[in-house]
Image: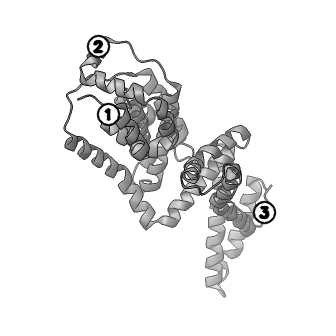
Amino acid sequence: MGKGVAVTYALWAVGGPLGLHHLYLRRDSHALLWLLTCGGFGVGWAREIFRIPAYVEEANQGSAGGRGQRRRAPPPPVSPARFAGQVCVGIYFGVVALIGLSSLSFFYLLVLPLCVGAGVHLVSCAGHETSDLPKTLTACLLTSPIFYGRAISTLPISLAASVTAAQNRRYKQPTPPKPLGVRLYHLGLAWLAFTAPLGYCVFYNTTATLSYLVECVASLLDWLWFFPQLQRLLGFFLLLPYRVLCLLTGGGELGGLGEDWEIVLEKMLWQHWERERKSREVLSVSSAASLDEITQSYRELVKLWHPDHNPQRPEEAAERFLQIQEAYKTLLSLHKTQRGE
């Protein structure tokens, strides 16, 4: 039975960000991608308003066996939109892994690159295209040690995987259709695998989760300080889901979105800047202090407040000693991020 354009548009309007129209058209990889990214972060869902007729025609041709001609077809043309989506979703999967799975052994060497590669490959499989999964994961595993433990490591890993996926793109081979129950079962398992670690971390470690998100965003903005245009572009995409929500619910005016972004960004980064300010206050250094000056102040204060040197007030000394250690660790991490080390 052929698919209808009107039905597809209705599903797109009602549950498009959840991928209902792609599920209807048997585009399961695309449906899963939309389900996990809320319609491609809102951008992909809005863009599809002009592409649905082509999707429907392709689905009807596929059900009639028209895709069999792709067995000997040349590789599909390179799509800048698909490549950008691969990079963004790879970073997104990497951030989710950092939030929910960072406590696992060999996280930066194995878990993180595999998660980033899975995100890139999911975009590669959207629609009638696919790519070579082993080569994509290999590129991630080879790139990950170079940026081991850095806050922005997901970006180069995702770029390497996206380039590899683009070089090995090809059309999907036709497969027999599966029952709807089986397809929903597979989609449900994939959704649970993605959301379970994230849900556990959010509900049982909310403070640490928000702190790490803020730190990642702040580190990335610090790294892009010499690219103000990229900073503004990043800010636009970070707030895009909020803007879409305001437009759909009437919770914000178009003219006030810039002010809304400033407020949201200030709230997101306040904790990061406040922790830096307090750390400099504990070590008695200025915002312009060099790493050598920070280290020198740290060593002097450690000697001064070491519990062994303060037997008359051990509790106060132990508390100050821990504060000094934490402050030095914070400023050292910030210094490495700014220098790109």
Q: Around disc 1, counting alpha carbons within 10 Å, would you say few (fewer than 14), some (14 to 19), or many (20 or more)?
A: many
- The residue identified by callout 1 is 25
Residue at the spot 35% in from the left edge and 56% down from the top edge: 196
Q: The residue tagged with tag 1: helix, strand or loop?
A: loop
Which dot marks residue 69?
2
Residue 63 appears in which quarter of the rendering?
A: top left
Front-lying residue, 56 or 301: 56
Q: The residue tagged with tag 3: helix, strand or loop?
A: loop
Q: Position of residue 331 (x, y in %)?
A: 68, 58
Q: Position of residue 314 (x, y in %)?
A: 62, 84
The three-letter code of the residue at mark 3 reads Val
Residue at the spot 74% in from the left edge and 59% down from the top edge: 294
Residue 21 appears in which quarter of the rendering?
A: top left
The answer to which of marks 3 and 1 sits earlier in the sequence is: 1
Q: Position of residue 274 (x, y in %)?
A: 69, 64
Front-lying residue, 240 or 101: 240
Which dot marks residue 267?
none
The three-letter code of the residue at mark 1 reads Leu
Marks 1 and 2, how far apart in space?
Answer: 20 Å
Q: The residue tagged with tag 2: helix, strand or loop?
A: helix
The three-letter code of the residue at mark 2 reads Gln
- The residue identified by callout 3 is 285
- Left or right, 46 with respect to 52, comes to right
Mark 2 vs mark 3: in front: 2
